[in-house]
Amino acid sequence: MKRFILKRDFEDRFKKGTKFYVVSESEFIGVKEYVLRTQDLEHRIVISEAELQKNFIPMN
C-alpha cells in the first residue's frame, strides 16, 4: 500500500506531517484521481494527480 505524508497544511483540515494511505487510484480520459485516507482511517479525501504531487511526499 502506498503511503504519503503531507508537505504543508491542506484544506484547513489537515496539518503538515499528517500521514495518508492511498486507498484507490483511478484514471478516466487521462485524468488521474486518488482516494487517500488518514492513517487512523477516519478521514477521506479525493485529489487529482497534480494536487498529490504538489502537497504530498511519498514515504518509503
Image: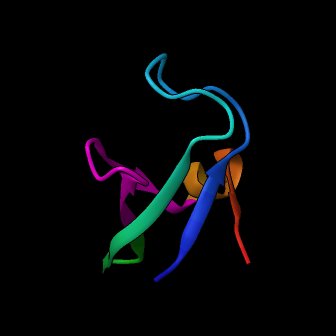
Give coordinates of residue 55: x percent, y percent. Answer: 66, 44
In the picture provided, is 20 more to the left or to the right than 54?
Answer: left
- The residue shown at (59%, 27%) is 15
State the residue in front, 6 or 52.
6
Residue at 28%, 41% in the rendered image: 43
Question: Please, is residue 57 above or below residue 60 in the view?
Answer: above
Q: How many marks?
A: 0
Residue 30, above or below 43:
below
Q: Is the residue 48 above or below the residue 3 in the image? A: above
Left or right: 18 as drawn, with respect to 48: right
- Magenta residues, start to end: 33-49
Spot occupied by residue 26 in the image (x, y as percentages of width and height) = 31, 77
Q: Residue at x 73, y 41 (%)?
A: 7
Residue 29 pos. (x, y %)? 32, 77
Q: Quadrant of residue 18?
A: top right
56 magenta-colored: no
Estimate the x, y position of residue 44 in percent, counting from the top left.
28, 47
Color theme of the render: rainbow
Most extreme residue toward the top is 12
Q: Residue 33 is drawn in which quadrant?
A: bottom left
Magenta stretch, main secondary structure, is strand
